[in-house]
Amino acid sequence: MRVRNKLNYPLYFILPALVLYLIFSIIPSLSGIFYSFTNWSSYTTKINFIGLENFKTIFSASENYLLFIKNTFIFTIITIFAKTVIGLALALLLTEGTKRLAYFYRMMIYVPVILPAIAVGLIFKSILNPSTGLLNTSLRFAGLGALAQKWLTNPHIALYSVIGVDTWQGVGYIMVILIAGIQSIPREYYEVADVDGAGFWAKLIWVTLPMMMPTITIVTVLNLLYGLKVFDIVYVLTNGGPGYATDVIYTAVFQAFSQGQWGLGTAFSSLLFVFMCVLGYFVIRLMDRGQSRD
Amino acid sequence: MLAKRSRQAVFHLLAILACLISIIPFYLIVTNSFKSIAEASSMSAALPSILHVENFVTVVATGKLGTSFLNSLFYATGSTIIGTLCAAMAAFVLSRNRSRFNRFLYFFIILGIALPTNFFTLTKVMQITQLINTKIGILILYAAGQIPFGVFLIYGFLDTVPKELDEAAIIDGCGPFQLFFKIIVPLMMPVLITDAVLSFLGAWGNFIMPLYYLNNTANWPMTLSAYNFFDMYHMNWNLFSADILLTVLPVLFVYFAAQRYILSGMTAGAVKG
């Protein structure tokens, strides 16, 4: 049987996928760790070892890199929270609240997910325009002119505006996964709860949420992986501005790339790589458990 | 009964509101793409007074959309075919022959879902392989990027394809290629379509790889051209809306044609994962 397995399921079927993955993902990531300790730049061909200099720069208080890391974390934590809460509310609405048309609603709410981030970003640049944008004109029309803001140019608000747009775009994805989670809860639990006279909130807290924990974990992991690597939407909406108010890790990496500071940029990328590897280890353990479950 | 009715009505109103909020930006670009430059200057939600269809002609001509459209089509289709095929073949063997080594390989590959890209060393790889600034280079980058998720998605689905079929085919004298292409691939069609659609949408919307690795505008996909178009004509919201509309139309078309596969695939992968 062993021999037959090897014959019928040959290793060379894996090779194309493995080779592409190694060349374009693993090799760049691992060699990046080596280049992190050099003064690699686009201006010279000579590369010298400079020890921990790049990391000292990243972690020094006089530079802005710590701010970029902080912004990335703020972005990630708030989007995890917002997408999960809103996604769960929508998922409940489309499973418990409305039965008829639920599929149609779900299809519509999912539309932003498939739009290219560049299109979303550019459209919202117009919607969030302080004087002519749809958001501020609607607010003024509703007599709420005091709430009108310079959404993308006020350094205190810009990051939250970006978070808002990203949540708008991503929440449909999270909702769809949460709906599947809700639908996989056995009906009997609700029937028992009904017999006990449990209302909506009691059922939510004692049945739905505990049963949804595996799905919520997955959604959190997906949002976490996305948030730490976010680039497109920030780049298009604000390009890190005003000042450095919305700069995240990957916009800073792009700047380092454009300015030729390759050693520094590589060090920054490698930090994220190591962090993601650790995270990835837990994700895999989670996925493995999910697969042995069924 | 009445209370239940009115509660239902509230739920439906809320759901409709959520739908409207989800598609308002799309409505904005559709209406504004038909307006005159003055009418579109505020990107308001009002309907156009006259339909300026010529906006689309202008955009296609000045934005060189024909070339970018073909480029996007080339990148998205090519990478989808290569990526899905590679992922399916790997997932098939990894799932069927679960030796210790193959278990390790499976986890090693799906770790790629989490890994960030190092654009600096990837530049070096692209230079060494002579793929930098080439169309085929972008196509291969997309294909490689799709593989970890594809393997994960297809591997999960293969549990539902009984192994007895393999054994019957093998007894009948099928080699690995025949077994895979004639027996397994037809049975995997639902998940292959899901993976292909997700890959296509991902590749069509991507603009970070071209941003880093294509400096020749003739090779740009629609996303990057649209971004550039915005820089040049950002006062002309009508033309700009038309450009965006043309960029997202193919995506919407694929979505509505294949949304059954997208929603089912999303949930299959995630609930399992």
Image: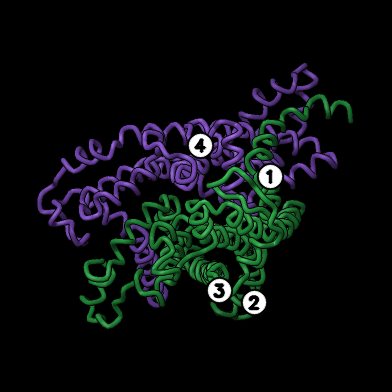
Q: Residue at x 57, y 70 (%)?
A: A66
Q: Which chain is drawn using green?
A: A
SS label for mark 2: helix
Label 1: few (<14), some (14–19) or many (≥20) C-alpha neighbours in 10 Å: many
Q: CA distance from mark 2 to mark 1?
A: 44 Å
Q: Residue at x 77, y 16 (%)?
A: B173
Mark in front: 2 vs 3: 3
- Dividing the picture into quadrants, the one containing residue A63 is bottom right
Residue placed most toward the observer, A255 or A219:
A255
Q: Residue at x 53, y 47 (%)?
A: A43
Q: Is residue A81 visible?
A: no
Residue type (three-letter) at the residue carrying disc 3: Ser
- Dividing the picture into quadrants, the one containing residue A284 is bottom right
Q: CA distance from mark 1 to mark 4?
A: 18 Å
Give the mark count.
4
The reply to whether label 2 and label 3 mark residues of one chain is yes
Q: Which chain is drawn using purple?
A: B
- Tell which circle, 2 or 1, labels the residue nearer the N-terminal end: 1
Chain under disc 2: A
Q: CA distance from mark 2 to mark 3?
A: 50 Å
A271 is higher (above) or lower (below) than A210: above
- Which residue was labeled with disc 2? A206
